[in-house]
Image (cartoon, rainbow, N blue to C red):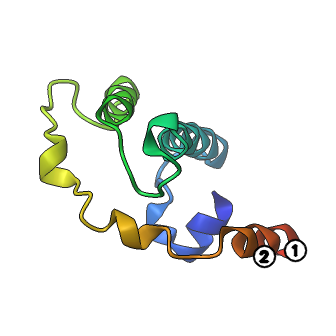
């Protein structure tokens, strides 16, 4: 999260103690990771399964990241049109690069 905040400072919550911001951000990312690796995606990056999207929506409402009464139409905010392009990278090379990264 700190790397993300360093690269994109505007993504770091303002007026929140860093420990709380970090804890919340980690919880959000863990929720996202569950849908990124959903068994229903067939291993395709960027592919969202409706039930997984609904779980993220529920999480966002529970943690007041989204108004509890908001109606979210997945078709208006997501398309599978670009999914075939998402996976055009060498996953092993990315993992190797991440393992050797030093701050």
Q: Could you classify mark 2 by the number of other residues whose Cα lies within 10 Å: few (under 14), some (14-19), or many (20 or more)?
A: few
Q: Counting other residues with Cα less than 10 Å from the Cα at mark 1, is it few (<14), some (14-19), or many (20 or more)?
A: few
34 over 79 or under it: above or below: above
Q: For the N terminus, which image quadrant?
A: bottom right
What residue lies at 29% left-to-right and 34% top-to-bottom?
A: 50
Residue sitting at x 64%, y 75%: 90
Residue at the farthest front position: 42
Q: Quadrant of residue 2?
A: bottom right
Measuring 33% from the left and 25% from the top, which residue is drawn there?
58
Indicate left or right for 72 with 11 as reference: left
Residue 41's x, y, as percent?
A: 44, 44
Up the image or down, 94 lies above or below 13; here it is: below
Locate residue 93, reporting x and y percent.
74, 76
Left-right relation of 8 to 58: right
Element type where label 2 sits in the image: helix
Q: Report which residue position mark 1 lands on.
A: 100
Q: Write down the residue under mark 2.
A: 97
Quarter of the C terminus within the rendering: bottom right
Q: Which residue is more in the foreground, 73 or 65? A: 73
* Residue occupying image coordinates x 55% and y 43%: 37
State how many labels appear. 2
Give the label on residue 63, or none: none
CB atoms of marks 2 and 1 within 8 Å:
yes
Q: Nearer the viewer, residue 51 or 88?
A: 88
As helix, strand or loop, the secondary structure at mark 1 comes to helix
Q: Is residue 5 left or right of residue 50?
A: right
Q: Marks 2/1: CA distance?
A: 5 Å
What percent of the width, then of the height, locates residue 47? 38, 51
| Residue 61: image location, x then y, percent | 31, 28
Relative depth, front residue between 97 and 22: 97
């Amino acid at each position: 999260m700190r790397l993300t905040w360093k690269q994109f400072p505007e993504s770091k919550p303002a007026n929140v103690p860093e420990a709380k911001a970090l804890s919340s951000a980690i919880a959000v990312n863990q929720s996202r990771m569950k849908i990124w690796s959903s068994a229903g995606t067939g291993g395709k990056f960027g592919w969202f399964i409706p039930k997984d999207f609904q779980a993220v929506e529920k999480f966002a409402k529970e943690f007041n990241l989204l108004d509890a009464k908001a109606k979210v139409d997945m078709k208006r905010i997501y398309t599978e049109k670009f999914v075939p392009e998402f996976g055009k990278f060498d996953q092993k090379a990315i993992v190797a690069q991440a393992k050797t990264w030093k701050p």
